[in-house]
Amino acid sequence: MSSSELTTIEAVSGTACVLRGDDVDTDRIIPARFMKDITFDAMGNHLFEDARKAAKGNHPLDDERFFGSEILVVGKNFGCGSSREHAPQSLMRFGFRAFIGQSFADIFAGNCCSLGLVCITLDEADAESLRESIELDPEQTISIDVAAQTVTCRSGVMRGSIPEGTRNRLLEGHWNATSLLMDAGKKIEETASSLGYVSGY
């Protein structure tokens, strides 16, 4: 992917799923036994597997009202625990493109940004209003404006927050570090070859 083909992420819209509860850690999101796979391809199949089994069909991800949702609405400190990338990978491969919560674990949020997934926070009152709105009308479209840092639902427009560095990376298309390095490969080689203490060029 060249710099002219960088994907900017300015907004995310879609239906949403409400997952209540705070301090949902990465082990709950994707149980550790599923991390032995060589690729992330099947990770979405095991998203919240243990929690869903324990709920016996009553987990939000198994509620047909929320099927096909692209936005997950969570509580406080979502994604805490280990720093594994498998958690956002499994969420993305299940179909989620954005997360709205009261707070996110820093490493989880960073891993999400590196995948082009949006994490935006709301204050407690707005977060609860959004959850209630979605539970009353799961078919409504929820819209996240990355530049304006807002969330729009049937209840109105809510002011959110995205860290400035993260927001800029998404808006400028610089969230994919691997693509940026590949695009800069020639410049890296030219710089390395000009340095006397770097051998092999």
Image: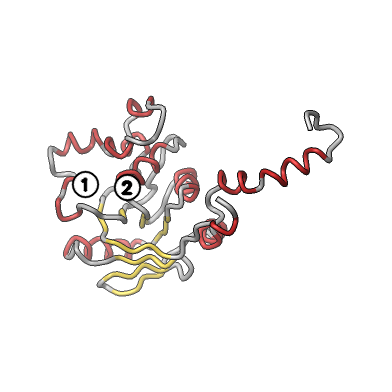
> Which of the 4 quarters of the picture holds residue 140?
bottom left
Percent of width and height locating residue 153: 29, 69
Contact between marks 2 and 1 (CB within 8 A): the answer is no
| Amino acid, disc 2 | Asp
Asked if residue 89 lies left or right of residue 111, the reply is: left
Percent of width and height locating residue 12: 38, 62
The answer to whether 29 is drawn above or below residue 165 in the figure is above
> Which of the 4 quarters of the picture holds residue 17?
bottom left
The answer to whether 16 is drawn above or below residue 28 in the figure is below
Asked if residue 58 lies left or right of residue 148, the reply is: left
Q: Which residue is mark 2?
A: 22
Q: Residue at x 26, y 50 (%)?
A: 19
| Amino acid, disc 1 | Leu
The quarter of the image holding the C terminus is: top right
Residue 11, numbered label: none
Percent of width and height locating residue 188: 72, 43
Q: CA distance from mark 2 to mark 1?
A: 17 Å
Q: Residue at x 32, y 52 (%)?
A: 75
Q: Residue at x 54, y 56 (%)?
A: 6
Q: Which residue is mark 1?
A: 61
Asked if residue 62 lies left or right of residue 159, the reply is: left
